Each structure stands twice: as structure tokens, then as C-alpha cells.
Amino acid sequence: MTLDHFPGYGAEMDHIRSVNSKPRNSGAGGGCCIGLGVIIGFFCFVYKANYGLTGESMLAWLAWFIIGAAAGFLLEKLIYAVLESQQKNAANDLAAYQRAFEGEAWRMSSRYARSAVTAEIVRRLTGALVRSIQAADRAGHIAEATATFTYCVYTTKVEFDGPEHGCYSFAVERCADLNGPLDQTALAIAIASMLRSNVAATNLKNSRDKNYELTASYKYKGDHVAATITYTASNGNYRPERSW
């Protein structure tokens, strides 16, 4: 399972995200040092001019410009190396956090799978999912029948789409709200697993489909987890092209 738009928690995760999203262009540091060299060279030039302009004053300005440019180039390389290291560490931290989050969500999903409340939700969603599968286009020119069914897990409800829209409100059904993204993800995983089992046990009206698969994908969208069940099967009504 991979969660897109992966959620982060607390100040530490915000810091990891901010470091990881910083632009890699650090030329401003080098430009500042080059500018500093030019300014220093300019004042040296003006000072020399007050006492008579000589070839030495021109060389001094040129020398300070070169020194400033060199220092700016080296500083830019140093800043870039430090930023690269920070971004690499932040990416590793974020990947480790994501693995831990997903592993914990899968572990918690078994508890939700045993819940009577989850069973109630799945019973409602199963009918909508089956109707979505039955409504898939199976015209003779389509080799593969496909259907998608999406449900969204909030902390206070589960909403689902398909040929019809539905909502399982935790307040109306008298069950406790979820505690946050981890519980939402765990419930979404448990629902997907149970839906696959229910569909496997259902006698679909269109029995000509062959080798069907049900896959689940998840996206975290700020206040809810959107789970999409995708049905794919070889269309039994498909007719190959005829030669002339």
C-alpha cells in the first residue's frame, strides 16, 4: 500500500517537509560575496582616487573583485553541499516515517476488521460496489471490463460514491469518532479487505467476466482517506476484429 499526499504529524514532521521542499538553487550566497568584493574594491578605488588615480588603484579594484568572486563561488558550493545533505537526511526520515505509519495502519486494521461497526459499513458498501461492477461497460469492442468504487473515511463518517451516493454517519449510528489519520487509514484498509472477500462470495450477474481482480489504492487528502477499489476483468462479451 502506498499513500499519496502522505500525512505528517507535529513540528518535527513539518521541519522535515520544509527542509525537503527547499529549492536547491543557492546562488544567492555566492552572489552576495561577489557583490561584497565589488563594493570593497570600489571603496579602495575611491580612496586611491582621492590621493591621485594610479594603475595600482585599478588593479586593487580588479583584485578585490576576483577575490570576492572566488569566495562567493566557494561559499555557494559549501551551502549547496550542506543543503544537499539536509535534503537527503529529510527524505530518509520521511521515508522511514511513512514505512512506520503504513506498517502500524496495517497492524491496526485487524482490530477494525473484527468490529461489528465495520461489518455494518461493509454491508452497505458491498451492494454499491457490486452495482458499480455490474454497470461497467461490456460492449463487444471492449476487451477489459473496468469499474472503480471510491469511499472516503473521515473521523466522523464514511462516505461512498458509485451509481448512488451514501454516508455512514458515526453520530447517527451511535459509534465513536476516529482519532485521526492512523485510525482512518486502518479502517480504510480493513474495509477494502472485507469488500474483496464479499465480492468474491457474491454471484455477479455478469458471469462471463474472466480472471477478475480487485485492487485497492489510498490517497490522504487532508481531512480524510480516499480509498478506491478498482475492478478489472476480461470481458466475456468481447469480439475480436474480423478480417475483410
Image (tube, rainbow, N blue to C red):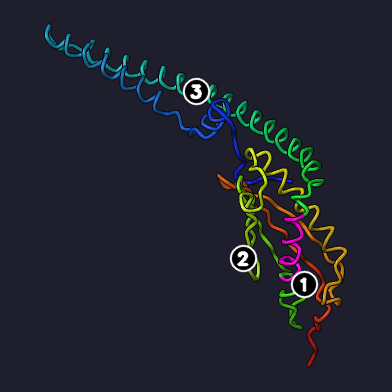
Residue 181 image position (x, y, % from top left): 63, 40
Give the structural element (helix, strand or loop) at label 1. strand
Q: Judge from the rendering whether residue 126 lies leftward or rightward of residue 48; answer left or right.
A: right
Mark 1 sits on what residue?
Answer: 144
Mark 3 sits on what residue?
Answer: 77
| Disc 3 from disc 1: Cα separation | 54 Å
Residue drawn where x is 80% and y is 80% of the image: 238
Q: Judge from the rendering whether residue 114 lies leftward or rightward of residue 131; answer left or right.
A: right
- Nearer the observer: mark 3 or 1; the answer is 1
Can you tell which mark lies on residue 165? 2
- Tag 3: amino acid: Lys
Q: Quadrant of the C terminus?
A: bottom right
Q: Which residues are magenta?
A: 120-131
Q: Nearer the viewer, residue 147 or 89?
A: 147
| Disc 3 from disc 2: Cα separation | 56 Å
| Disc 2 from disc 1: Cα separation | 26 Å
User: Residue 2's image quarter?
Assistant: top right
- Tag 1: amino acid: Glu
